[in-house]
Amino acid sequence: MSRNRVNGGFALLLSILILFVLSASFIHYLAVFESEKRFFVLEKEVNSLDHMLISALEEVLLLMEEEDEHLAAGKVNDINGTVHYTITHINQNQFSIVIVARTISGSQRGAKFTYHIKTGILTNWTEGAHIQ
């Protein structure tokens, strides 16, 4: 009878230990899943911002050609948010252009560069969240 009690205590201890290990692994994999989910959301935001910057760049350059280089500022609407641009005249053939994209969720990324109107060359490209 005493031997049966010892085996019963061991079985209870083993069951609790297995339950603890299973619970810990479940919590760990849940944390990994949530981390991956956040990563994919951030990756989608970055890809959307990059797409918005490139699309706005093409549109701004087309608008500059149509407006005879007298364009100063404006806004381009996109499915994912809005892009604001500012054009500053440097000299007769060069312009400084600042493009700031903001998604619907509030993420922001900007680009600043110099555009030579006669050659169509972009120089001094600077990009990041700090560009205003």
Image (cartoon, rainbow, N blue to C red):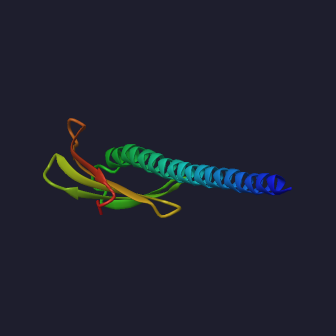
Q: Residue at x 29, y 50 (%)?
A: 127
Q: How far from the left and from the top, in percent, is residue 97?
A: 27, 53
* Residue extending furthest toward the top: 119
- Quarter of the image where the N terminus is located: bottom right
Asked if residue 35 lies left or right of residue 63, the reply is right
Q: Is residue 10 above or below residue 73?
A: above
Toward which corner of the image does residue 20 lie, by quadrant?
bottom right
Foreground pick, 64 / 37: 37
Tell me: residue 73, above or below residue 68: below
Q: Nearer the viewer, residue 40 or 63?
A: 40
Residue at the left extreme of this rendering: 91
Residue 16 image offset from top left, x and y in percent: 71, 56
How many callouts does the rendering have? Answer: 0
- Locate the C terminus and report the quarter of the image it occupies: bottom left
Image position of 22 (left or right of 97): right
User: Farthest residue toward the right?
Assistant: 1
Q: Position of residue 56 (x, y in %)?
A: 41, 49
Q: Could you say which is closer to the camera, residue 2 or residue 105?
A: 2
Which residue sits at x=50%, y=50%? 39
Q: Is residue 19 left or right of residue 40?
A: right
Query: Which percent across, then down, holds residue 115?
Result: 23, 45
Question: Is 42 left or right of 116, judged from the image as shown?
Answer: right
